[in-house]
Image: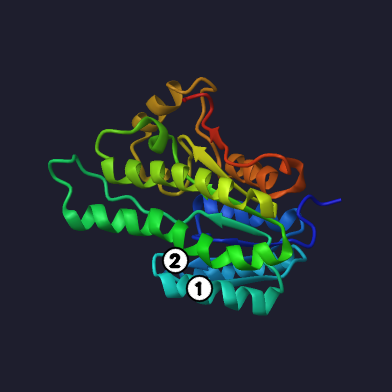
Amino acid sequence: MKLLENKTAIITGATRGIGRGIAIMFAQQGANVAFTFSASVDAAKALESELNDLGVKAKGYQSNAAIFDAAQKLAADVIKEFGTIDILVNNAGITKDNLLMRISEDDFDKVIEVNLKSVFNLTKAVIRPMMKQRKGSIINMSSIVGINGNAGQANYAASKAGIVGFSKSVALELGSRNIRSNVIAPGFIETEMTGKLDAATVQGWRDAIPLKRGGSPEDIANACVFLASDMSAYITGQTLSVDGGMN
């Protein structure tokens, strides 16, 4: 029996890295997948056909979750196409790193808008259908940086810490409707983005991690499958660090 059989998931920002890993593993576990992307049309088409090949229904939506009305429309479109929304994974995020002295107002606002406001927008868009079916799992992607902070990432840390407080509040509000809200806080995850970094720097990061390796998108996806499935039916309002022991 697949853990997510007959469930429908929305995953934001799924054409690369962690989001892509989650989408593929969800499909392998039997979930139908609606995913969003911003610009990468070719990558979205490739992912769509890869997911369909796994025997599930999958569809990509070019949608900006940072815009309130776009999130509402996405949820309506997914309900129309798939019939239910059982799982929401708020994964889309950006960084605009700089020391506080140098961060522009725009760089602060943009990161809060894409990383935090989008979580509000999409959660708000899916709770009605979830309340109707009296079931749902919301998984929000924070970061070790949202828990520990990081020099040069005050904007990113603020957005990711905000996700933790938001998710706990949603868990308290919606628990009586059997809707769960949890957070995953990834540590150093090796994706195509980290592949462009200096090898010695990356090795230095690995050496500082108790498990002595960077994480993979699959490591995050495994935790997501657990929180999305009925295996975690009595878990809500929690933050799960998937960081090899860094935190």
Give the residue type at disc 1.
Answer: Gln
Instruction: Name the residue that disc number 2 marks.
Output: 65
Instruction: Name the residue that disc number 1 marks.
Output: 72
Q: Is residue 81 left or right of residue 38?
A: right
Image position, residue 180 (x, y; %): 64, 49
For mark 2, give the secondary structure. Answer: loop
Badge 1 or badge 2: first in the primary sequence: 2
Along the line of sight, which residue is nearer the eye, 231 or 216? 231
Tell me the quarter of the picture where residue 76 sits: bottom right
Residue drawn at x 52%, y 43% as measured from the top left: 168
Along the line of sight, which residue is nearer the eye, 63 or 117? 117
Residue drawn at x 48%, y 67% as measured from the top left: 37
Label 1 and label 2: CA atoms lie apart by 9 Å
Give the residue type at disc 2.
Answer: Ala
Residue 50 showing in the rendered view: no
Relative to 47, say whether 1 is above or below.
Answer: above
User: Badge 1: few (under 14), some or many (20 or more) residues near its Cα, within 10 Å?
Assistant: some
Image position, residue 27 (x, y; %): 71, 58
